Image: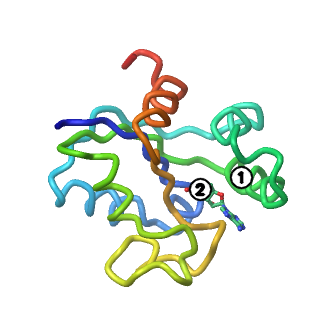
Amino acid sequence: MSERTLVLLKPDAVRRGLVGEILGRFERKGLTIEALELRTLDGETADQHYAEHVEKAFYPPLREFITSGPLIATVLSGDTAIEVVRALIGSTDGRKAAGGTIRGDLSLSNRENLVHASDSADSAAREIKHFFPELG
Ligand code: CMP
């Protein structure tokens, strides 16, 4: 079943010049780019996006990082895209993520882990609406 998912290429991906590498992996997999925008998040937008994490100890430095420069927000679509994208990016901690995944190959950090992707159909709907309200 075709699904949409919200993906952020975080400020570390832009700073490190990895946007083409990461988007290329999604494109080569067969996913379709439905929307794409370069933007810098303000603190309020970050808090809304990470609402489930705002009380956690790791959130203040995460907020600092995610607002530290431009990121790429994109909506990808394809068959079971939510699960497929999560598999391509790998587990949260780049030091532990499996080789062959984006984080496993390209990140050495638990915070600066290059990519965010929606983790469920509910979060995809909420996050897509938040970043691209025109897509519904
Ligand atoms: P993401 O998939 O965007 O979801 C929440 C983010 O919080 C996560 O990627 C990491 O960037 C960050 N994060 C999660 N757990 C930790 C942690 N223990 N320490 C630092 N950052 C974390």
Q: Nearer the viewer, residue 123 or 14?
A: 123
Q: How many marks?
A: 2
Q: Are marks 2 and 1 in contact (CB under 8 Å)?
A: yes
Q: Position of residue 102 (x, y in %)?
A: 39, 70
Q: Residue at x 49, y 48 (%)?
A: 8
**Colouring convention used in this rendered image of the protein:** rainbow
Quick one: quadrant of the C terminus?
top left
Q: Circle 1 sits on which residue?
A: 68
Callout 2 secondary element: helix
Would residue 97 appear left or right of 110 to someone viewing this image?
A: left
Toward which corner of the image does residue 34 lie, by quadrant?
top left
Would residue 82 appear left or right of 112 to someone viewing this image?
A: left
Would residue 27 appear left or right of 89 to someone viewing this image?
A: left
Relative vertical location of residue 8 with respect to residue 111 in this rendering, above or below: above
Q: Position of residue 62 (x, y in %)?
A: 73, 56
Structural crowding at the residue carrying mark 1, measured as other residues with C-alpha within 10 Å and reported as few (<14), some (14–19) or many (≥20): some
Which is nearer the N-term, disc 2 or disc 1?
2
Relative vertical location of residue 52 with respect to residue 96 in this rendering, above or below: above
Q: Residue at x 43, y 66 (%)?
A: 18
Quick one: quadrant of the N terminus?
top left
Q: Residue at x 32, y 53 (%)?
A: 83
Badge number at residue 11: 2
Name the amino acid, label 2.
Answer: Pro
Name the amino acid, label 1.
Answer: Ser
Callout 1 secondary element: loop
Structural crowding at the residue carrying mark 2, measured as other residues with C-alpha within 10 Å and reported as few (<14), some (14–19) or many (≥20): many
